[in-house]
Structure formats: structure tokens, C-alpha cells
């Protein structure tokens, strides 16, 4: 059976850069990356629309990420339910034919059903954007759903890309994704605290017992590794080493 590892980290911590590094590595024939379904959230369509040219108002009407950032109190719950659906779908994706032939196959995910809840939904609840009732309903079906699929969804490990919120802010502004331009530093700070409690201090209380003892590889990505071959080599070495222990 292949191992499943999720890549966690703040918005713009550098997940995409890290994923490119994995894909370019000499081990990449054993590795497969399942991307974050962001494309879907930025262009939500119903199945009939897929065959038609969308008008621009329909397009912006279907940009759930934009809607979330514009009016979180209205859209947080809808966003979280859709995010979770897309995550469950991607975490259930069977490995490619190529991966099945690999000696030590690993599937990587960009974030997971766990960060959705423990980092994002929980922050939105704390900021008042998810109401008490919405948060309870969400947690109830989230726990139930994950129990149903636990055997297929369960992770074997987590890689935490750890960077100070100010650095993430710099990277966020630099990459210029339109939907994110109004994201305040305080939001990144709040998400950072959640990541830290969950994956660094490991003192976050949660509903998923096995997560408490799951191996976590913490990678400091404050400094850019994009153009630094020595740092890249070091990161890949750490990843390969940790995977051997799983
Ligand atoms: P990186 O720069 O680290 O590669 P990315 O892979 O592009 O980052 P993001 O962290 O930017 O991915 O995530 C895409 C957007 O979706 C971002 O604005 C955060 C948002 N997002 C993801 N999951 C959730 C969620 N469950 N609730 C709210 N927002 C979410």
C-alpha cells in the first residue's frame, strides 16, 4: 500500500514551490502530488454550465474563494462544505498506474480535510464568521464523514512548511493572486497560530485520535529555497529520510 502525506502550511508559505521541488527530484518516480483543488473554488459551475460559455457575471458569481474573502460571514459555511467535499474526493483518488509500479510509492496532498477543519473552519468560527450552529453542524458531519472513510483517507505523515506570517504576506503580495489581495496580516497570524498549535507545539485538542501521534516533519521555509540548490538538497534529504521511517 502506498503512503499518504499531506503538505501543510500557511497561505503562501511556499507549498507550490515545494511541490515543484518534489516533482523535480530524483525520487519523483515514486512520488505523486495531488494538488489543492483551488481551481474548482475559483470557478464553481453546475454540470449543465460546463458545456456553455459562461458570462462574466456568472463567472464571478461562481468564484467561491472571492466570495469568502469579500464576505466571510455570508460564505464561510458554504466554502467549508465545498472545500471538504473536494478534499475528500482528492484524498480518495486512487494512485496512478505509474505510482502502482513504484517501489516506495507516496501520494502527497496539498493540505487535507484536517487543515480545513483545524485551521480554517476553526479560525472562521473564532472570528465569528461561522455561527455557533454552523460550526456544530459542520463538525458533526465532518467527523461522521471522516469516520466513514477513515481507512482510505488516513494519513501516514505530515510535512509542515513553517514560515513567519510576515514572510507569507510578502509572498502572497508577490504572487498577486487576485482573490487574496485584501487578506490582512492578522488573518495570516491567526492561521499561523493554528498551524503552530497543531503541528509544532502539538497541543491542539482534536477529534481524530490517530493524528495526535502522526509523524510530522517540520521544514523551516522562512528563507527562500527557490533559488538555493544547497537548501533544496537539504530539504529533499530530510523528506526522503523521513519517508523511510514511515
Ligand atoms: P502556497 O503559496 O503555499 O503554494 P497555495 O498552494 O497556492 O499556497 P494557498 O495556501 O494559497 O495554496 O490556498 C489557496 C487559497 O485557498 C488561499 O487563499 C487559502 C484558501 N483556503 C484553502 N483552504 C481553505 C479553507 N478550508 N477555508 C478557507 N480558505 C481556504
Image (cartoon, rainbow, N blue to C red):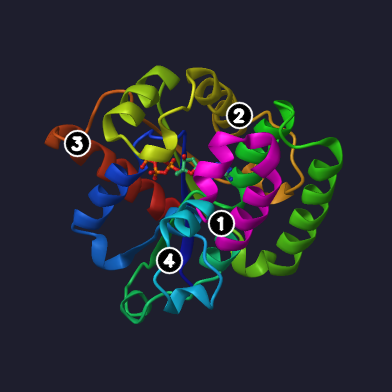
The structure residue drawn at horizontal position 84% and vertical position 36%, both measured from the top left corner, is 132
Q: Which mark is residue 54?
A: 4
Q: Is residue 133 left or right of residue 158?
A: right
In depth, the one of 3 and 188 nearer the eye is 188
The residue tagged 3 is 226
Mark in front: 1 vs 4: 4
Q: Is residue 140 left or right of residue 113?
A: right
Spatial CA distance of label 2 from label 3 is 26 Å
Mark in front: 2 vs 1: 2
The residue tagged 2 is 194
Ligand 1 closer than 8 Å to label 4 CB: no
Ligand 1 closer than 8 Å to label 2 CB: no
The structure residue drawn at horizontal position 25% and vertical position 50%, both measured from the top left corner, is 20
The structure residue drawn at horizontal position 49% and vertical position 59%, both measured from the top left corner, is 58
Q: Describe the element under mark 1 as helix, strand or loop.
A: loop
What is the span of residues highlighted in magenta in the rendered image? 62-86
Any magenta on residue 66? yes
Q: Is residue 175 above or below residue 114?
A: above
Q: Earlier in the sequence, mark 2 or mark 3?
A: 2
In depth, the one of 25 and 190 nearer the eye is 190
Q: Residues within 10 Å of mark 1 (few under 14, many from 20)?
A: many
Q: Which mark is residue 155?
A: 1
Where is residue 159 shown, x and y percent of the image?
A: 44, 43
Q: Describe the element under mark 2 as helix, strand or loop.
A: helix
Mark 2 touching mark 1, by CB under 8 A?
no
Q: Earlier in the sequence, mark 4 or mark 2?
A: 4
Q: Is residue 62 above or below residue 229?
A: below
Residue 163 position by quadrant: top left
Where is residue 182 shown, x and y percent of the image?
A: 46, 27
Q: Earlier in the sequence, mark 1 or mark 4?
A: 4
Q: Earlier in the sequence, mark 3 or mark 4?
A: 4
Amino acid at each position: 500500500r502506498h503512503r499518504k502525506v499531506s503538505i501543510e502550511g500557511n497561505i503562501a508559505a511556499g507549498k507550490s514551490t515545494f511541490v515543484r521541488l518534489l516533482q523535480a527530484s530524483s525520487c519523483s518516480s515514486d512520488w505523486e502530488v495531488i494538488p489543492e483543488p483551488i481551481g474548482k473554488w475559483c470557478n464553481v459551475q453546475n454540470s449543465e454550465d460546463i458545456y456553455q460559455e459562461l458570462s462574466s457575471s456568472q463567472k464571478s458569481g461562481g468564484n467561491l474563494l472571492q466570495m469568502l474573502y469579500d464576505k466571510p460571514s455570508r460564505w464561510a459555511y458554504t466554502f467549508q462544505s465545498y472545500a471538504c467535499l473536494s478534499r475528500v474526493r482528492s484524498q480518495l483518488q486512487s494512485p496512478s498506474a505509474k505510482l502502482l509500479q513504484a517501489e516506495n510509492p507516496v501520494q502527497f496532498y496539498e493540505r487535507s480535510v484536517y487543515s480545513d477543519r483545524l485551521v480554517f473552519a476553526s479560525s472562521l468560527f473564532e472570528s465569528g464568521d461561522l455561527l455557533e450552529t454552523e460550526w456544530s453542524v459542520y463538525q458533526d458531519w465532518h467527523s461522521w464523514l471522516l469516520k466513514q472513510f477513515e481507512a482510505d483517507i488516513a494519513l501516514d505523515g505530515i510535512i509542515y512548511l513553517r514560515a513567519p506570517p510576515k514572510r507569507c504576506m510578502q509572498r502572497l503580495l508577490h504572487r498577486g493572486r487576485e482573490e487574496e489581495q485584501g487578506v490582512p496580516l492578522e488573518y495570516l497570524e491567526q492561521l499561523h497560530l493554528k498551524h503552530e498549535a497543531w503541528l509544532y507545539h502539538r497541543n491542539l485538542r482534536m477529534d481524530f485520535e490517530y493524528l495526535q501521534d502522526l509523524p510530522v516533519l517540520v521544514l523551516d521555509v522562512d528563507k527562500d529555497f527557490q533559488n538555493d540548490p544547497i537548501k533544496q538538497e537539504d530539504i529533499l534529504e530530510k523528506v526522503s529520510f523521513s519517508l523511510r521511517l514511515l
